[in-house]
Structures are given as C-alpha cells and as structure tokens.
Image: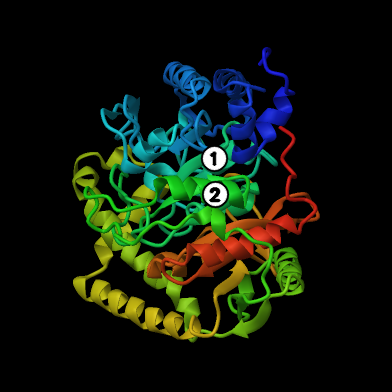
C-alpha cells in the first residue's frame, strides 16, 4: 500500500464506514487495500488458519472495477470497495465451497449464494473463503479437513465454532467483515472468543439460498464484523425476501444504521436469571455483570427475568439439529462414512437414534418455549446473558477445570445461545471485556422476532461507552 496517504495499519484496523469514506475521498484505493490484505493474509494465515482459500485474482479485479466506478461518481454505498470474506459453506461463484470437508474438497460452485450476490451488488469485494468446523457441525472449529482454526489472541486456543475462520479473520484484520452462519451459536460463539461482533438475525430475515445446510429449521446466515455499526451495514445489505428461499420473509428491511443510538432511556432490558450456574466461569460472570450495570447507567431499566425450564432448551435444539443434519447427510454417511472428521461423523450418527416421536416432541417443546418468550417480551425489549459460559481453551484439550471438576467443555459451550436458534430470535454477541489473561468475553443481546433494531440500539450504546472497544489482537 504505497500510493495512498494513510498508514496501512490504520487502514486495516479501520471500520467499514471509515474506510469507505477514505476510499471515496481518494486517500486510499480499494485495490491498494485488497493487495495489502492479500499480502498480510499470506503471513498471518500461517498462524491462525482462518482462510481455506484467498481469491487473489478475482478480488484484485473486483477492486479495480470498484475504484473505477467510485472515481466516476458511481458509489454504491458504504460497502463499495470493501473486502469481505465468506465462510466456506456459502457458495461463491468460481470458487471451491468445501464446507471444510474432504467430501466436498473439489466442489467448484458456478453461482453465488443470494447473500453473496447482495454483497456484490453493494460493491463489496469477496476476498476469501473461511475455514470452519466441518459441515458447520461443531462449536469449536477444531475439526476441519484443513486443520483447526486458531484464535488470533492466542493461536494455541480454539476460536469457537463453527464460523471460527470468519471471526478470526475479522479480528486479525484480514478483512473488514465476514459472512458466517449460525445454527446453534456458530456466529456468536467464535465472536465471543475472538472479540468480534456476531449477529444472528431473525430466521427468514436473510436468504439461505446457496448455503450448504446443516439444519433447515435452525440455519441462519450471520454477519461478523469488528463493530456494531459494521454489522448493521452488512445486515442491511444482505437482508430481504428471496424467491429462491421460501422461508425468507417479505417484511420490509429497515435502515439498520438509523437504529444506532446512545440513548437507552426508554429501553426495557431483561437479564436472564441465574441458570446453568454449574458451568459458568467466574470471570465471565463478573464481566457480564459489569456490562449489565453499564447498560443500566446508560439509562435502560433493567430487571431479572426467569424462564421456566430454559436449561432444557439447548438439548431440544440439539435434538432437532441432529435429526435434520442426519437426514441431510444420509447418502454420504452410507457412501463416504470414512471421509468425515471422526467427531463430526459421531454427531451425525447420533441422529439415527432419534425417532419421529422424539422429533415431534422437540417441535412441541419449541412451541412451548416460543409462548414463554412471547410472554417475556411483553415486558422487556431485549434480553441479556453471557454469550459463552467459559473462556476459549486449548485446541484438542479434552477437559477443563469447572469449579473443581474436570469436564469436557464442548457439550455446554452453546448453552446460552441455542435457545435463540430454536426460536429464530435475533441475537448478537458484542465484546464486553477481557479476562485476566487478556482473552475476549462476549455479552449476548437478543430481541423479539424481526426487531433487530432494538438489539442493535442496545449493543451500539453499550459498545460506544466502553474504552477498550477498539482493542485488537497483536498478530
């Protein structure tokens, strides 16, 4: 990056809105940014394994076209010329979409997912395909045909999953945002562990066409970014009805950026009452409690909320995912069983042990929880909780110490997030502090169906009030 007038490090670390302004003002070009990020990715990706492929030729060509359009006064908005990455279970025209698997390692796609198509229409540059947990079926991003995703805050640690490569690439300033997915926390978990913003919108808000499915009724496309404003920009670009996805909603897409405000005086905030205490790390608890108090000080009214039997919501979601995922993978499980990562194969084969009766009961329990949350949202606008109950742990570590007992952490990483997939509610993770060892911790904010604006408003006000909001990993 030589021609521009700005320091390359400053440009890499800038927000989408800042960098968009610099490009329009001629202080830096999209081409310079893309070439710089490609060079940086060659060095950094060796440490964190966030990319399966960097789309160098296509990205540079797209950046040059963007520069020409912008110079001729044809700006498409804040994403024009901005490099964005895409999780490798989302189709990108002309690239391999492998789902981080051996089975699809040669799956060259000749079309764009609708969400990618919308990004291109907004002028974004697709810079690479991100590593992830194989077929998006795991909460750690350890088990990929291409090796584990590594945390940019400490490469010995997990990123969280399944969209681990997306979150680590964004945190490490290898791109300005990413399209991940979120079926049981897959966008929010790695965002909590990597210090990014992961936003799962309402089910149906964003088209799922072009996504390799894991669970039809719980899959969501999830923008991942470094700031709340950037997440709002990405969501606004990709949201909307799509005739190729019958589950996509016809509801009008709001101007999400207009919802961002630091005034919370009329906001009613509920805090999910103390549950899952047996697996909650004390540093996580204290950090989240401090964040709740900060939101109270910003003017919101805060009350504790209790939802009966909420501890059973994650197992209900897990059962639905297992049944649907096994159905999707049935042919490959018969023909290519040995080509799966062992842990993923085990999860998929669990689905064989559930009956139609189990599945129907899980659907009925989903409706019961839906009624309970409808009741709760009559009295509050958003709900707060930790995103994850623990801190990221070492890749391959079989157990961690939980209140004096050695436990496998994988089964409960997603305990706080899966309820919002089960019900299709909008929920995001925003960084809310750091552990004594310097690891990020995430606060989860969830809202009513199709009320992403309330979630963004609370998250933005909180983010802007924090002195460490621009803190990034040194990698």
Choose between 402 and 280: the one closer to the eye.
280
How many numbered marks have been drawn onto this rendered protein structure? Answer: 2
Report the residue at 32% width, 61% height from top. Answer: 322
| 438 relative to 331 in the view: left or right | right
Q: CA distance from mark 2 to mark 1?
A: 8 Å
The one of 337 and 74 positioned closer to us in this rendering: 74
Residue 458 in sight here:
yes
Q: Nearer the viewer, residue 372 or 279?
A: 372
Residue 177: which disc? 1
Residue under circle 2? 231
Q: Earlier in the sequence, mark 2 or mark 1?
A: 1
Residue 370 screen position, x and y as percent: 38, 78
- State left or right for residue 97 relative to residue 47: left
What residue is drawn where x is 74% and y is 35%? 474
Query: Where does the image place residue 16, in percent across and percent down from the top left?
Result: 59, 38
Q: Position of residue 394 (x, y in %)?
A: 64, 46
Q: Is residue 269 above or below residue 188?
A: below
Q: Are there few (<14), some (14-19), or many (20+) residues within 10 Å of tag 1? A: many
Q: Residue furthest front?
A: 73
Find the residue positioned furthest to the top. 2
Where residue 12 appears, x then y in whole percent? 66, 30
Disc 2 vs disc 1: Cβ atoms closer than 8 Å? yes
Quarter of the image holding residue 29? top right
Residue at 49% of width from left, 86% of height from top?
308
Left/right placement of residue 460 relative to residue 202 reads: right
Q: Relative to residue 304, is residue 131 drawn left or right?
A: left
Which quarter of the rendered picture does the N terminus lie within? Answer: top right
- Secondary structure beneath label 2: helix
- Would residue 387 be seen by someone viewing this image from the given angle? no
Q: Secondary structure at mark 1?
A: strand
Q: Quadrant of residue 11?
A: top right
Give the answer, above or below, for where 225 lies relative to 320.
above
């Amino acid at each position: 990056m030589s021609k521009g007038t700005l320091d390359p490090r400053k440009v890499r670390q800038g927000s989408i809105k800042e960098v968009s302004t610099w490009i329009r003002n001629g202080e830096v070009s999209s081409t310079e940014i893309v070439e710089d990020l490609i060079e940086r990715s060659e060095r950094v990706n060796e440490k964190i394994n966030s990319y399966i492929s960097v789309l160098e030729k296509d990205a540079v060509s797209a950046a040059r076209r963007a520069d020409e359009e912008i110079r001729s006064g044809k700006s498409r908005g804040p994403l024009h010329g901005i490099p964005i990455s895409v999780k490798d279970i989302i189709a990108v025209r002309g690239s391999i979409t492998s789902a981080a698997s051996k089975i699809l390692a040669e799956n060259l796609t000749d079309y764009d997912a609708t969400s990618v198509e919308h990004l291109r229409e907004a002028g974004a540059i697709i810079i690479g395909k991100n590593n992830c947990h194989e077929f998006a079926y795991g909460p750690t991003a350890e088990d990929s045909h291409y090796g584990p995703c590594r945390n940019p805050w400490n490469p010995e640690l997990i990123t969280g999953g399944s969209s681990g490569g997306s979150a680590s690439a964004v945190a490490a300033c290898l791109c300005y945002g990413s399209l991940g997915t979120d079926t049981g926390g897959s966008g929010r978990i790695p965002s909590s562990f990597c210090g990014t913003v992961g936003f799962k919108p309402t089910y149906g808000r964003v088209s799922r066409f072009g996504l390799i499915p894991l669970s039809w009724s719980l899959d969501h496309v999830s923008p991942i970014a470094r700031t709340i404003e950037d997440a709002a920009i990405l969501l606004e670009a990709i949201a909307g009805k799509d005739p190729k996805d019958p589950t996509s909603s016809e509801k009008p897409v709001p101007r999400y950026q207009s919802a961002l405000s630091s005034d919370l005086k009329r906001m009613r905030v509920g805090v999910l009452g103390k549950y899952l205490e047996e697996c909650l790390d004390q540093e996580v608890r204290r950090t989240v409690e401090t964040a709740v108090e900060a939101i109270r000080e910003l003017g919101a009214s805060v009350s504790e909320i209790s939802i009966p039997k909420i501890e059973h919501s994650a197992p209900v979601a897990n059962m639905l995912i297992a049944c649907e995922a096994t159905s999707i993978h049935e042919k490959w499980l018969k023909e290519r069983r040995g080509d799966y990562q062992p842990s993923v194969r085990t999860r998929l084969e669990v689905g064989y042990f559930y009956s139609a009766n189990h599945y129907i009961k899980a659907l009925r329990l989903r409706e019961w929880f839906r009624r309970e949350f409808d009741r709760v949202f009559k009295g509050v606008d958003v709900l707060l909780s930790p995103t994850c109950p623990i801190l990221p742990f070492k890749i391959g570590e079989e157990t961690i110490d939980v209140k004096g007992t050695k436990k496998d952490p994988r089964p409960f990483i997603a305990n706080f997030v899966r309820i919002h997939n089960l019900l299709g509610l909008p929920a995001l993770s925003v960084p809310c502090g750091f552990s004594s060892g310097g690891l990020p911790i995430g606060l989860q904010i969830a809202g009513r169906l199709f009320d992403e604006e309330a979630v963004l408003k609370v998250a933005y006000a909180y983010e802007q009030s924090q002195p460490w909001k621009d803190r990034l990993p040194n990698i």
